[in-house]
Amino acid sequence: MCSARLRYYLSGGCPPGARRVLPGCRDTREPAAIRPLMLPGGIYFALNSSQWTGGVALYDPHLPGATAARAYLLTAGQFADVVAQEMRREPGIDLDSILTSGTAQLGPGPYETLVHTGEHDGHPVLTFTAPWAAGDVSTTSPAAPYLAVLADGLREAHGWSADRIVGYLATRPGIAGAWTVDQLRDVVTSAPHRA
């Protein structure tokens, strides 16, 4: 959700805290528009990131509730290039199948399934996640640095207070039962403010 992190996907470079250099998009223009958005469904934390040393957020459109997100109005080519970078693939991913079917599994990995979540202001809203449902995998607690980045993104994208961010995160599978509200508050309030 942090616009500074998206800029690395657009222009290339190594985001703070990352271990790999992103090549950037072939079209490096800024998004035509940026909006906070709530998607149907929920997030959960699973797997174990070698970069973050803990669980990562994955989107499941079938979970109850809503997911805080941020919509960036990109060209189809830019979105395809962002997806290719996340999947560690060469540019040139075809997006036609996702617009007709609603989903497209491009590989078995955690961010290799594209989901068409609906429309906003006449534009398709697309994201990427895992091919499995939240209930199909064991949850994994995320690391504090990862949660700090999420908190920063929620603050920047939605203007949420620390209490609202803590309340939102505390109930998510992978965090609930692994993090106390006080521990979450410590991470959220110490997260850098880069907005």
Image (tube, helix red, strand yellow):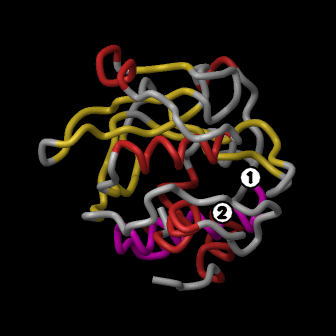
For the residue labelled by badge 2, is the local secondary structure a helix, a strand or a loop? Answer: helix
> Which residue is denoted by mark 1 in the rendering?
142
> Residue 147 at what x, y percent from top left?
66, 62
User: Furthest residue to the left?
Assistant: 122
For the residue labelled by badge 1, is the local secondary structure a helix, a strand or a loop? Answer: loop
On-image quarter of the C terminus? bottom left
Q: In which quarter of the image is residue 61?
A: top left
Between 73 and 131, the residue placed more toward the observer is: 73
Q: In this view, does 130 lie above or below 153?
A: above
Q: Quadrant of residue 116?
A: top left
Looking at marks 1 and 2 on the same chain, the residue that comes earlier in the sequence is marked by 1
Secondary structure mostly taken by the magenta-highlighted segment of the chain? helix
> Which residue is denoted by mark 2 in the rendering?
147
Q: Which residue is found at the position 35% from the left and 74% from the top? A: 159
> Residue 24 at what x, y percent from top left?
58, 60
Q: Which residue is found at the position 52% from the left and 35% from the top? A: 92
> Residue 189 at what x, y percent from top left?
60, 81
For the residues marked 1 and 2, what is the alpha-carbon distance in whole angstroms? 7 Å
Q: In this view, does 185 lie above or below 135?
A: below
> Is 35 in the magenta?
no
Give the residue type at disc 2.
Leu
> Is 146 in the magenta?
yes
Q: Which residue is found at the position 38% from the left and 67% from the top? A: 29
33 left or right, relative to 71 = left
Q: Which residue is found at the position 35% from the left and 23% from the top? A: 96
Q: Do the residues labelled 1 and 2 touch (CB within 8 Å)?
A: yes
Q: What stretch is highlighted in magenta?
A: 142-162
